[in-house]
Image (spheres, rainbow, N blue to C red):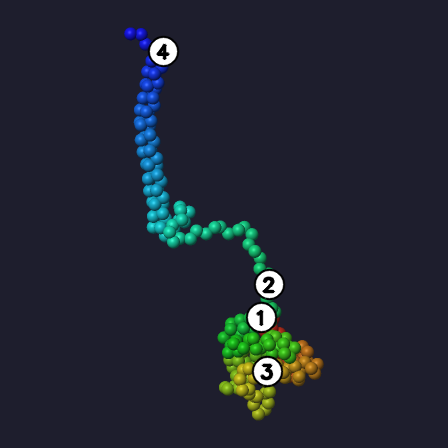
Amino acid sequence: METTPFERDNDIGFWKNLVLVVVFFTIAPITLAISLFSLVSLKTSSITNIVLSTNQGVQNLTVGPLSGVKVYASLPMELPSVSGSVESADARTEIVKQYMESYDSPLAPFADLIVETADKYSLDYRLITAIAQQESNLCKIIPPGSYNCWGWGITGQGTLGFTSYQDGIEQVSEGLRENYLNKGYVTVEDIMTKYTPQSNGSWAHNVDQFMTEMP
């Protein structure tokens, strides 16, 4: 029986479609299986990395964001600047405080008052601290209950006493201004000639040295 060209074309188309169907149903399951295997492998690897990092005490946040964990971006290379200045009074107070604390002085809590009173009477803020260091080892060697850390008002009858450290700071600062600086005793050496005239110069030398230790 003779086959027409049209019938031959139909036979070829049928077998071609059959081959395509077979190839599709063969390759598609394989491709799907490979995809599923890859996804499972990646998930298992990620979980393993997280567990290892946590067990080592370092939580690796670069693996992936975890529930309840915050991921922070890196800081910018240039940080915004904050301008400002430290007031000189604050610095002076801290200098005096740290100096007296290094000697365990009972005057340390009054460092701010010392600086304020020095400004009130236009004195060097270090002066009465240095004198207290020279006269009483910063108030550790004084007549009991006198609060006189400066050897102020020493007479043949005894040493002047104050009602408190605050009272002593006020009166000594005022006395240095009115009875010394205002009368021409403007250097430590000048003050020594009236404050302790019997000194051979060591009083002024020591007071100067103590002042240089509070720059």
Mark 1 in CB contact with mark 4 (< 8 angstroms): no
Q: In screen coordinates, is 58 left or right of 149? A: left
Q: Residue at x 51, y 52 (%)?
A: 75
The mark closer to the camera, 3 or 1, is 1
Task: Quarter of the image for the N terminus: give it.
Answer: top left
Looking at the image, tell me whether mark 1 or mark 2 is earlier in sequence order: 2
Q: Residues within 10 Å of mark 4 (few under 14, many from 20)?
A: few
Neighbour class for label 2 at 10 Å: few (<14), some, many (≥20)? few
Disc 2 to disc 4, C-alpha distance: 98 Å
Q: In the rendered view, would you say 24 is above or below 213?
A: above
According to the image, label 2 marks what residue? Answer: 84
Q: Sequence order check: which comes first, mark 3 or mark 1?
A: 1
Residue positioned 50% across, 86% down in the render: 144
Q: Secondary structure at mark 2?
A: loop
Q: Which mark is residue 90?
A: 1
Cα gap from disc 3 to disc 1, whole angstroms: 20 Å
Residue placed furthest toward the left: 1
Looking at the image, tell me whether mark 2 or mark 4 is earlier in sequence order.
4
Type of amino acid under label 1:
Asp
How many numbered tags mark residues here?
A: 4
Q: CA distance from mark 1 to mark 4?
A: 109 Å
Q: Which residue is mark 3?
A: 170
Say which quarter of the image contains residue 185.
Answer: bottom right
Q: Are marks 3 and 1 in contact (CB under 8 Å)?
A: no
| In this view, the mark in front (1 or 2) | 2
Question: Sequence-wise, which precedes: disc 3 or disc 4?
Answer: 4
Q: Amino acid at mark 3?
A: Glu
